[in-house]
Image: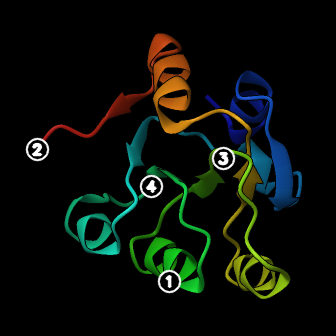
Amino acid sequence: MTLKEIQNLLDAEILCGDDECLERKVRICFACDLISEMLLYLKPHSLLITSLTNAHVIHTAQVMDAKAVIFVGGRKPDQSVIKSGEQNNIPMLTTSLLTFDCCGRLYEKGIKGDRQ
């Protein structure tokens, strides 16, 4: 699926990311609210789903080469975090859905978690 398709599926708002970024293909995702677990388990080219909105999430996404970050529960990071995402070419979206619902919808459409 592309990020654009995921945006539509999750009824998400784009916080940053241009049209080119939204054409990125996603095959796997990882949902987590602990930075330490993100660093342990997030695989490159994954979609990161989280309720954390601090700058550490963007730094982690950058280090782990994530495709994009989706914030759940209607959460939005502050402008400095969004600007960091823009500067680091990390698309960010927000949805009112909770983590479970996001993961369920993505799983139904063929997006899987990474199996170790």
Place of residue 110 in the rendered image (x, y in percent of width and height, measured from the top left):
45, 17
Which one is earlier in the sequence, the residue at label 4 or at label 3?
3
Which one is earlier in the sequence, the residue at label 2 or at label 1?
1
Indicate the quadrant containing the N terminus: top left, top right, bottom left or bottom right.
Answer: top right
For the residue carrying disc 2, how many other residues have a C-alpha within 10 Å: few (<14), some (14-19), or many (20+)? Answer: few
**Residue at which label 4 appears:** 45
Label annotation for residue 116: 2
In this view, the mark in front (4 or 1): 1
**Residue at which label 3 appears:** 24
Q: Is residue 91 left or right of residue 8?
A: left
Q: Residue at x 37, y 54 (%)?
A: 32
Q: Residue at x 78, y 76 (%)?
A: 82
The three-letter amino acid code for the residue at tag 1 is His
In this view, the mark in front (4 or 2): 2
Q: CA distance from mark 2 to mark 3?
A: 23 Å
**Residue at which label 1 appears:** 56
SS for dot 3? loop
Place of residue 45 in the rendered image (x, y in percent of width and height, measured from the top left):
45, 55
Place of residue 22 in the rendered image (x, y in percent of width and height, measured from the top left):
77, 47
Viewer-nearest residue: 98 or 38 = 98
For the residue carrying disc 4, how many other residues have a C-alpha within 10 Å: few (<14), some (14-19), or many (20+)? Answer: some
Q: CA distance from mark 4 to mark 3?
A: 10 Å
Q: Residue at x 76, y 56 (%)?
A: 21
**Discs 3, 1 touching: Cβ within 8 Å:** no
Residue 75 drawn above or below residue 90? above
In this view, the mark in front (2 or 3): 2
